[in-house]
Image (cartoon, grey):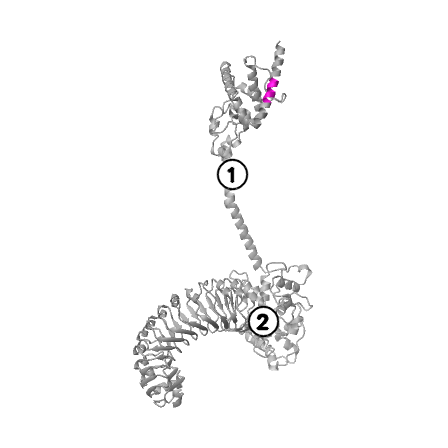
C-alpha cells in the first residue's frame, strides 16, 4: 500500500515538475502575470513554513554547510538537489511539492527570477536564509564599481545576515566590495592614470620635440665632413642641378643657356667654388648650397667688372663654359682649391688646371700687366702668356691674408679686367665668391643663432649694375634687402614678391627699375618699409597694398605711377607716406585722414584737385605736409593751426586765394612754411611772430600787401631763408634786419620797398643770396657785403643799379630790373 502511495507521490511530483516547467515558460512571456498568480499562495506557504521552523529544533552551524549543499543542483537528476521523497509530516503534500518544485527550478535558471520584479521574495523561502541589508538594491544583485569605491558594502558586511548568505549569492559579489585593500588599489590606479595623462605624457612629448629641434639645428649648422654618395649614380654637378630644379630656384632652360647668369653660377658652385658644398638630392635642407648659388647669380647679374658673365676671377665667357672641377696636377676632380701662398708658379699651374690658356687682351698695356705682379715684387715679361693668366686668378684664388693686405692691387686688377674698359668692381665686395661663409661676405648678415641663414643683404651706393635676379627667392628667410642708390635696371621679379614672406624692409630707391608693383605685394604680410622712390615704375598701384597691416613707411615718389591712391585705411601703423612726383589724379584721398599715426605726408607734384577737407586736422601726429604743385583751390584753411606738431608745411604751386590766417601763428614748432606761387592776398599777420622756430619763410609770387612787421626781424632770429619777392609789399626795411644773423637767403625783389638799404646788412655774415632788384630802395650796398662775395659765402647779389650803388652786383642792367 505504501509502495503504491510512493509511486503515486513520485508520479505527482513528476507531473508537478512538468507543471512548474510549463508555468516557468509562461513566466518568460509575462512575468507580471506569474507574480500575480502565485502571490497569494506564496504568502500562505510562508506562514506555514514559519510555523514549522518554530516546531523544529535549531540546527548547528556545522549543519549549514550540508544544507547549502542540499540547495545546490543535483547533477544526477537534472532537476534539483533535494530528495524526491516528500516529508511525511506535511499535511498538504501537493501544495508543498508545488512550491519546492518552483524553488528547485528557480535555483536552476536564475534568469526567470531576474525578469520577475518580485524575485527577491522567492529567494527567502528557506528558513535558513535571511535577506541581506542593502541600499535600496535587490538581494543578490552585484555591487557596482562606485558603490564599492564609496563603501556601500560596509553595512552589508556588518549585518548578521552576511554569514548566512547562500554561497550562490556570495559568489556574485565583487572583490572590491569585500576588501579595503581593493578600494585603496582602485584609488591608486585612478590617481596614477590621471597623473600619466595630465603630466607625464605631455612632458615626454615636449622633451621629444625639443630633442628633434636640437638635432635639426645641429644638422643644419654642422659642416659635412664626408661627401654623400652621388644620387642615382649622377655626378656632383648633375646633383647640384637637380637640387636647384627641385627647389624651383632656376629653370632648366636657364641652366642650359650658356650665356645666362644661372649657368655661370652653376658652373662656379660646381667646379670653382672652394667650399664645394655637397648637394642633398630629395632632401629638404640644402640651405647653404642654395644660398651660395643665389648670391653667386646676384654677383654676376650686378657686377660689371666681370661683365656679369664669368666667375670672380674675371675669366671670359669662353673659358668658363669649358671649366673643369678643381683637382691636383693629375686631374683629380672635387678637391677645393688650395690657398695661394707660394707665389707665381702655383698660380700659373692652378690656372692651367681650370681650363684653357688665355690670350692676352689687346687693350692690356705692358705697364698694366706688370702691375699685376706687385704682390710678388718681381718684374715679369708682359709677353709671357702666364703673366696674363695670373691676374685672372689673383682676385679669386688669393688667400684671405693676401686679399686683406693687397686690396689696392686687387681693385686695380679688377678694373683692368673689364672687357669694356670701364671701372669694373663694386666699391666694396670683400669676401664675395671666396672660400669663406656667405655670412662673412660684405653686406651679408646672417641669423644671430649661428645657423648660417642669410637674413639681410645691404649693398647701398655700391656701384651695382645690371638686373635683380629672380634666384634671390632662395633666400627665403630674408628680412631686409637694401640695394638703393645704385645703377640697377629691369624689373623686380614677380617671384620675389611671392617667395620672400619674411621680408620686412625693401629699399631699392634711386635706381633705374621699371615695370609695375604687382598684386603679389599683398603676400608680403610682414613688410614694414617699402622704398622704391626715384625709379621708373609705371601704372596703377595695386589695391593689395591694403593687406600690408604692418606697413610703416611707403615711399614711391619720383616715378610715373598713375590712377588713384588705393585705400590704406588698414595700415594703421603707417607713419610715412610719400607719393609725390607721380601722375595721380582726383581729389585728395579721404582715407588718408584716418591714419592717426601718420607723421610725414608727401603728395607733391601730382594732379590732385579740390579743397582742403576739414578732416585734415585729425592727423594729430603730422609733422611734415607737402601738397605743393597740385591744383588745390579755395582758401588757406584754419585747420592747419590745429596741427600742433607740424614742422614743415609746403603748399606752393597751387591755386589758393584769400588772406593769410592769423591762427597759423600758433604753430610754434613750424620750421618751414612755403606758400609761393598762389593767389594769396592781404598783409603778413603780426601774429606770425609766434612761430619762433621758423627757419624758412617763402611766399613769393603772390599778391601780398602792407609792410613786413618789424617784430618779425626781432623775434624770428632762427630765420635762414626769407623770400618775399614778386608781391606788392611796401615800406622800409627795418634796421632790425641785421638781427637775423643766421640768414642765408634774402630775396625782396619786385616789390615797392622805399628808403635806403640798411647798413646792418654787414651783420649777415652767412648770406649767400641777396636780391633787391625792381624796388625803390636807394643808397649803396655796404662794401663789407661785397667783401663777403670775394672771401665769404655770398655768391649772388642783384640790385637796381640806377638807384643803388653796387660794386659787386651780378646784374646792373636797368632794363633787367623791370623784367
Q: Position of residue 813 (x, y in %)?
A: 40, 90
Front residue (pair 381, 41): 41
> Taking 41 as reference, is 750 left or right?
left
> Taking 749 as reference, is 20 left or right?
right
Q: Residue furthest top?
A: 1
Q: Position of residue 786 (x, y in %)?
A: 37, 86
> Mark 2 or mark 1, which has the lower sequence index?
1
Is residue 579 inside the magenta stretch? no
Evaluate if marks 2 and 1 touch, with contact meaning CB atoms under 8 Å apart: no
Q: Is residue 369 visible?
A: yes
Q: Quadrant of the C terminus?
A: bottom left
Report the residue marked by disc 2.
Answer: 301
Q: Secondary structure at mark 1?
A: helix
> Taking 451 as reference, is 644 left or right?
left
**C-alpha separation, residue under disc 2 versus residue under disc 1:** 70 Å
Label 2 crowd (10 A; few <14 / some 14-19 / many >=20):
many
Is residue 17 inside the magenta stretch? yes
Label 1 crowd (10 A; few <14 / some 14-19 / many >=20):
few
Report the residue marked by disc 1.
Answer: 189
Front residue (pair 145, 120): 120
Front residue (pair 320, 649): 649
Q: Secondary structure at mark 2?
A: helix
Q: Which mark is residue 725?
A: none
Amino acid at each position: 500500500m505504501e509502495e503504491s502511495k510512493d509511486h503515486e507521490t513520485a508520479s505527482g511530483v513528476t507531473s508537478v515538475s512538468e507543471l512548474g516547467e510549463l508555468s516557468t515558460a509562461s513566466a518568460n512571456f509575462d512575468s507580471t502575470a506569474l507574480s500575480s498568480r502565485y502571490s497569494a499562495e506564496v504568502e500562505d506557504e510562508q506562514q506555514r513554513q514559519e510555523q514549522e521552523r518554530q516546531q523544529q529544533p535549531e540546527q548547528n552551524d556545522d549543519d549549514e554547510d550540508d544544507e547549502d549543499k542540499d540547495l545546490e543542483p543535483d547533477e544526477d537528476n537534472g532537476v534539483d538537489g533535494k530528495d524526491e521523497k516528500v516529508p511525511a509530516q506535511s499535511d498538504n503534500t501537493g501544495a508543498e511539492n508545488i512550491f519546492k518544485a518552483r524553488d528547485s527550478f528557480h535555483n536552476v535558471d536564475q534568469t526567470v527570477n531576474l525578469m520577475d520584479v518580485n524575485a527577491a521574495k522567492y529567494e527567502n523561502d528557506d528558513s535558513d536564509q535571511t535577506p541581506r541589508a542593502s541600499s535600496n538594491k535587490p538581494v543578490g544583485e552585484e555591487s557596482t564599481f562606485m558603490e564599492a569605491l564609496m563603501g556601500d558594502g560596509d553595512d552589508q558586511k556588518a549585518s548578521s545576515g552576511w554569514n548566512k548568505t547562500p554561497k550562490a549569492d556570495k559568489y556574485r559579489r565583487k572583490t572590491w566590495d569585500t576588501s579595503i585593500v581593493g578600494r585603496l588599489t582602485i584609488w591608486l590606479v585612478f590617481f596614477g592614470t590621471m597623473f600619466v595623462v595630465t603630466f607625464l605624457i605631455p612632458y615626454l612629448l615636449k622633451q621629444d620635440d625639443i630633442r628633434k629641434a636640437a638635432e635639426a639645428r645641429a644638422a643644419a649648422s654642422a659642416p659635412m665632413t664626408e661627401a654623400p654618395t652621388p644620387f642615382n649614380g649622377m655626378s656632383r654637378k648633375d646633383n647640384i642641378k637637380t637640387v636647384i630644379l627641385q627647389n624651383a630656384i632656376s629653370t632648366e632652360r636657364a641652366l642650359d643657356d650658356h650665356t645666362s647668369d644661372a649657368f655661370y653660377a652653376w658652373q662656379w658652385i660646381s667646379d670653382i667654388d672652394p667650399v664645394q658644398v655637397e648637394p642633398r638630392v630629395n632632401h629638404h635642407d640644402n640651405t647653404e648650397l642654395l644660398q651660395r648659388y643665389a648670391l653667386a647669380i646676384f654677383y654676376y647679374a650686378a657686377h660689371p667688372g666681370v661683365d656679369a658673365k664669368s666667375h670672380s676671377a674675371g675669366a671670359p665667357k669662353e673659358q668658363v663654359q669649358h671649366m673643369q672641377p678643381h683637382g691636383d696636377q693629375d686631374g683629380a676632380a672635387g678637391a677645393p682649391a688650395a690657398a695661394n701662398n707660394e707665389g707665381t708658379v702655383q698660380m700659373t699651374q692652378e690656372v692651367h688646371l681650370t681650363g684653357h690658356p688665355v690670350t692676352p687682351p689687346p687693350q692690356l698695356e705692358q705697364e698694366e700687366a706688370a702691375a699685376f705682379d706687385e704682390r710678388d715684387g718681381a718684374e715679369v715679361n708682359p709677353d709671357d702668356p702666364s703673366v696674363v693668366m695670373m691676374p685672372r686668378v689673383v682676385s679669386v684664388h688669393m688667400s684671405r691674408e693676401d686679399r686683406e693686405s693687397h686690396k689696392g692691387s686687387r681693385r686695380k686688377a679688377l678694373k683692368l679686367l673689364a672687357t669694356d674698359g670701364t671701372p669694373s668692381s663694386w666699391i666694396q665686395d670683400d669676401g664675395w665668391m671666396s672660400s669663406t661663409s656667405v655670412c662673412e661676405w660684405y653686406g651679408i648678415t646672417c641669423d644671430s643663432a649661428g645657423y648660417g641663414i642669410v637674413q639681410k643683404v645691404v649693398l647701398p651706393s655700391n656701384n651695382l649694375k645690371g638686373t635683380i635676379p629672380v634666384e634671390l627667392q632662395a633666400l627665403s628667410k630674408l628680412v631686409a634687402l637694401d640695394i638703393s642708390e645704385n645703377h640697377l635696371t629691369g624689373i623686380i621679379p614677380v617671384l620675389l614678391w611671392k617667395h620672400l614672406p619674411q621680408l620686412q624692409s625693401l629699399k631699392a630707391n634711386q635706381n633705374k627699375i621699371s615695370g609695375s608693383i604687382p598684386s603679389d605685394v599683398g603676400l608680403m604680410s610682414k613688410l614694414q618699409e617699402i622704398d622704391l622712390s626715384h625709379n621708373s615704375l609705371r601704372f596703377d598701384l595695386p589695391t593689395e597694398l591694403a593687406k600690408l597691416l604692418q606697413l610703416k613707411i611707403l615711399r614711391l615718389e619720383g616715378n610715373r605711377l598713375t590712377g588713384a591712391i588705393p585705400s590704406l585705411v588698414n595700415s594703421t601703423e603707417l607713419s610715412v607716406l610719400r607719393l609725390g612726383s607721380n601722375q595721380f589724379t582726383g581729389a585728395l584721398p579721404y582715407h588718408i585722414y584716418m591714419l592717426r599715426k601718420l607723421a610725414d605726408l608727401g603728395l607733391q607734384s601730382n594732379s590732385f584737385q579740390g579743397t582742403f577737407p576739414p578732416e585734415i586736422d585729425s592727423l594729430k601726429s603730422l609733422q611734415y605736409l607737402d601738397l605743393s604743385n597740385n591744383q588745390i583751390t579755395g582758401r588757406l584753411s584754419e585747420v592747419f593751426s590745429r596741427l600742433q606738431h607740424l614742422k614743415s608745411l609746403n603748399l606752393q604751386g597751387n591755386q589758393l586765394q584769400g588772406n593769410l590766417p592769423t591762427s597759423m601763428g600758433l604753430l610754434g614748432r613750424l620750421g618751414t612754411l612755403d606758400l609761393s606761387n598762389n593767389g594769396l592776398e592781404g598783409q603778413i599777420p603780426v601774429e606770425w611772430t609766434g612761430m619762433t622756430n621758423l627757419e624758412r619763410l617763402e611766399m613769393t609770387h603772390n599778391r601780398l600787401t602792407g609792410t613786413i612787421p618789424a617784430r618779425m626781424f626781432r623775434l624770428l632770429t632762427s630765420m635762414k631763408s626769407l623770400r618775399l619777392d614778386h608781391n606788392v609789399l611796401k615800406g622800409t626795411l627795418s634796421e632790425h634786419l641785421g638781427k637775423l644773423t643766421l640768414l642765408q637767403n634774402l630775396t625782396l625783389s619786385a616789390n615797392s620797398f622805399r628808403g635806403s638799404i640798411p647798413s646792418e646788412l654787414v651783420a649777415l655774415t652767412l648770406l649767400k643770396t641777396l636780391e633787391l632788384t625792381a624796388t625803390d630802395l636807394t643808397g649803396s650796398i655796404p662794401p663789407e657785403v661785397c667783401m663777403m662775395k670775394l672771401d665769404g659765402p655770398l655768391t649772388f647779389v642783384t640790385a637796381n643799379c640806377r638807384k643803388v650803388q653796387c660794386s659787386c652786383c651780378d646784374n646792373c642792367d636797368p632794363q633787367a630790373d623791370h623784367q
